[in-house]
Image (cartoon, rainbow, N blue to C red):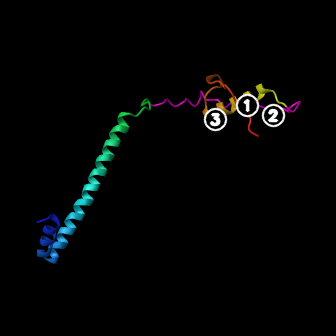
Amino acid sequence: MSLFNFSEEVASKLTLSEKIESILTTGIGGYLLVFVVLALIWFILAIFGKAFDKKDKKPEEAPKAAAVTPAPIPEPVAPASTEQDDTAIVAAIVAAISAYTGKPAGGFKVVSFRKKH
């Protein structure tokens, strides 16, 4: 007696309601198994995320309102020739970064910049 003959023999002896019950039990069990495995994977990834989180957990201190002063707006300089002086460009970049980040201009250094045409 082979396996296939056995299943046909059992299936032929089941009533319609028993067949439907078997199908529903198998389907619901399959869906539950899939969701349990997905929940397990999610749980493992959440643990790994917290274990390997490299961000500093220290809260940053908010800058004092009195200590923050807006950077002075540099006056536009008319170029004497087609090539501008690089120091004026660097000063404008530093002033813009300082105003955007709220840090003093001495807190960082512009290392390089490029012009895009």
**10 Å crowding of disc 2: few (<14), some (14-19), many (20+):** few
Is the Cβ of the residue at disc 3 closer than 8 Å to that at disc 1? no
The quadrant the C terminus occupies is top right
Q: Which residues are magenta?
A: 59-82
The residue at which mark 2 appears reads as: 76
User: Most extreme residue toward the top, as rendered?
Assistant: 106
Quarter of the image for the N terminus: give it: bottom left
Residue 9 locus on image (x, y percent): 12, 72
For the residues labelled 2 and 1, the Cα–Cα distance comes to: 10 Å
Q: What mark, if any, has residue 100 been given in the picture? A: 3
User: Magenta includes 71?
Assistant: yes
The tag earlier along the polypeptide, 3 or 1, is 1
Distance between the alpha carbons at the discs numbered 2 and 3 = 19 Å
Spatial CA span between label 3 and label 1: 12 Å
Is most of the magenta stretch helix, strand or loop? loop
Q: Is residue 99 left or right of residue 115?
A: left
Q: Tell me the quarter of the picture where residue 30 sits.
A: bottom left
Residue type, mark 1 in image: Ala
Residue sticking out furthest to the front: 1
Q: Who's the residue at 45% across and 31% down the image?
A: 59
Q: Nearer the viewer, residue 63 or 53?
A: 53
The residue pinned by badge 1 equals 92
- Type of amino acid under label 3: Tyr
Answer with mark 2 or mark 1, whichever residue precedes in sequence: 2
